[in-house]
Image (spheres, coloured by chain):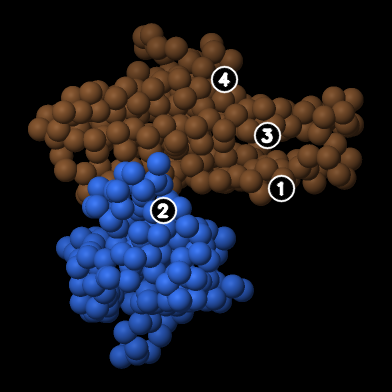
């Protein structure tokens, strides 16, 4: 499933984009937001693979930083409120583009997103390292404790945790604990 | 279809039965005959415009007139949020709890997995209660007192006594996310738990969890996007009296 975040102030344009994206027949989850205030929450809750963002929003302070921080791998496509020359980069759209241009650009972008990390995502298997991190988290250890025990930095632990959450669709520690028990990564006795 | 005041109340439910929750929480009882939304609201002392705006935004997730919501009385909003709490805690949660207990009972010979789910949910209920109680005992009374002050254009005695040190920022600092665990529970049930033989019960449990999640999302949206920004505006207003 390709998750797409559409950040566009104009309701009409937002709906138009969603309609075109829905025509692409790829299984997609589309989340729409209309202002820079909502972006951080949207990034962390849906973890988009692709962000289609109006330049009036991406030029706001902090927005680019937030995107880099929360979803460094997401493909970012800009929408301009002005006409743009033909044959420009595929990662730019204009509200004046006609349907054929839009659909071609969007289709190739969605396709490339699909190829790159949807594959990784479908192989939902956790890596050896991620299993180790999960085991310790499920036992109730803090990021810092996990880092010390595995001789890695807390930063690395956090990035493992993000991947675990993305792969499993489980956000909370208690949820991860339940998963770990169900999959015999830890046993019920370990936590009591 | 756009919901309007001259529409019949009964037709509104036919249009979208999920709005039954809105009707109940805003304090309106069924038995509308041929009355319009406007007529029913007036009979029940509910502001028609408030009802329409809430109904529209629950019906269509793209419709959310933030600025307009700010113009409604804080009391109306709080009344609605309180009824929602009540409905969730006294009705929805016990229903899910009951369903989980049944699963544990049914399957205790074969697997202990559902005990895990039960414990997970019990922990969640505890968190949810704490969260909602904090709002009921601190935030809502604070907002009501604040609103009284603004109406009387002076800091009332009660406000000075109980809330002089309080502000909404304090609440935001220990305000935690109450939807994450429901999201997890849903995924565990869909993706990871070996399904029992009676999938009808299982499906109905999942169905209730989806509904709870949606309900909590709508509820948080009203709190985060309307109540809290409105309270900030009210705090400023009080400062400048």
Residue B139 is labelled as 3
Q: Give the colour of chain A.
A: blue
The quadrant of the image that shows the C terminus of chain B is: top right
Mark 1 vs mark 4, CA separation in Å: 30 Å
**Relative depth, front residue between B163 and B94:** B94
Q: SS for tag 1?
A: helix
Asked whether the residues under marks 1 and 3 belong to the same chain, the reply is yes
Query: Circles 4 and 3: CB distance less than 8 Å?
Result: no
Query: Same subunit under labels 2 and 1?
Result: no
Q: CA distance from mark 2 to mark 1?
A: 33 Å
On the image, numbered disc 2 is attached to which residue?
A: A139
As drawn, the label of residue B65 is none
- SS type, badge 4: loop
Q: Position of residue A146 (x, y in %)?
A: 46, 66
Are the two marked residues, 3 and 2, in contact with CB atoms closer than 8 angstroms? no
User: Pointer 1: what residue?
Assistant: B169
Residue nearest the viewer, comparing A13 with A34: A34
Front residue (pair B194, B214):
B194
Q: Which residue is mark 4?
A: B46
Q: Which chain is disc 3 placed on?
A: B
Q: Tell me the CA gap for discs 1 and 3.
A: 11 Å
Q: Residue at x 42, y 58 (%)?
A: A137
Discs 1, 4: same chain: yes
Considering only order in the chain, which callout, 3 or 1, is on the residue closer to the N terminus? 3
Residue B133 coordinates in the image, percent (x, y): 60, 29
Left or right: where B72 falls relative to A42: right
């Amino acid at each position: 499933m390709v998750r797409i975040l559409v950040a566009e102030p104009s309701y009409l344009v937002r709906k138009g984009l969603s309609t075109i994206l829905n025509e692409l027949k790829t299984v997609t989850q589309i989340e729409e937001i209309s202002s820079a205030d909502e972006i951080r929450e949207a990034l962390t809750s849906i973890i988009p693979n692709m962000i289609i963002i109006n330049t009036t929003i991406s030029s706001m302070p902090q927005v680019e930083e937030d995107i880099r921080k929360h979803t460094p791998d997401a493909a970012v496509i800009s929408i301009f409120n002005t006409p743009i020359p033909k044959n420009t980069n595929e990662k730019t759209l204009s509200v004046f583009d006609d349907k054929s241009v839009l659909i071609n650009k969007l289709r190739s972008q969605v396709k490339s997103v699909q190829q790159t990390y949807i594959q990784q995502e479908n192989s939902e298997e956790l890596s050896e390292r991620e299993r180790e991190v999960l085991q310790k988290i499920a036992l109730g250890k803090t990021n810092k404790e996990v880092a010390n025990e595995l001789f890695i930095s807390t930063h690395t632990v956090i990035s493992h945790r993000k991947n675990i959450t993305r792969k499993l669709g489980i956000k909370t520690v208690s949820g991860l604990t339940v998963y770990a028990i169900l999959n015999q990564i830890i046993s019920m006795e370990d936590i009591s | 279809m756009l919901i309007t005041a001259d529409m019949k109340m009964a037709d509104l439910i036919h249009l979208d039965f999920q709005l039954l929750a809105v009707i109940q929480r805003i304090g309106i009882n069924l038995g509308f005959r041929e009355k319009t939304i406007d007529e029913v609201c007036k009979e029940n002392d509910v502001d028609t415009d408030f009802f329409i705006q809430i109904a529209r935004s629950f019906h269509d997730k793209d419709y959310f007139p933030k600025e307009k919501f700010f113009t409604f009385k804080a009391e109306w909003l709080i009344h609605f949020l309180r009824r929602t709490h009540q409905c969730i805690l006294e009705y929805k949660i016990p229903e899910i709890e009951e369903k989980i207990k049944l699963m544990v009972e049914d399957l205790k010979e074969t697997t202990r997995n559902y005990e895990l789910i039960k414990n997970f949910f019990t922990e969640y209920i505890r968190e949810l209660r704490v969260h909602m109680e904090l709002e009921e005992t601190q935030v809502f009374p604070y907002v009501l007192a604040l609103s009284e002050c603004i109406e009387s254009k002076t800091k009332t005695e009660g406000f000075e006594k109980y809330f002089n040190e309080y502000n909404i920022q304090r609440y935001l600092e220990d305000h935690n996310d109450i939807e994450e665990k429901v999201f997890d529970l849903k995924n565990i049930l869909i993706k990871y738990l070996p399904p029992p033989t009676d999938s009808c019960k299982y499906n109905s449990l999942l169905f209730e969890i989806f509904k709870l999640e949606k309900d909590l999302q709508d509820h948080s949206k009203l709190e985060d996007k309307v109540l809290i920004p409105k309270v900030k505006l009210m705090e400023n207003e009080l400062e400048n009296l």
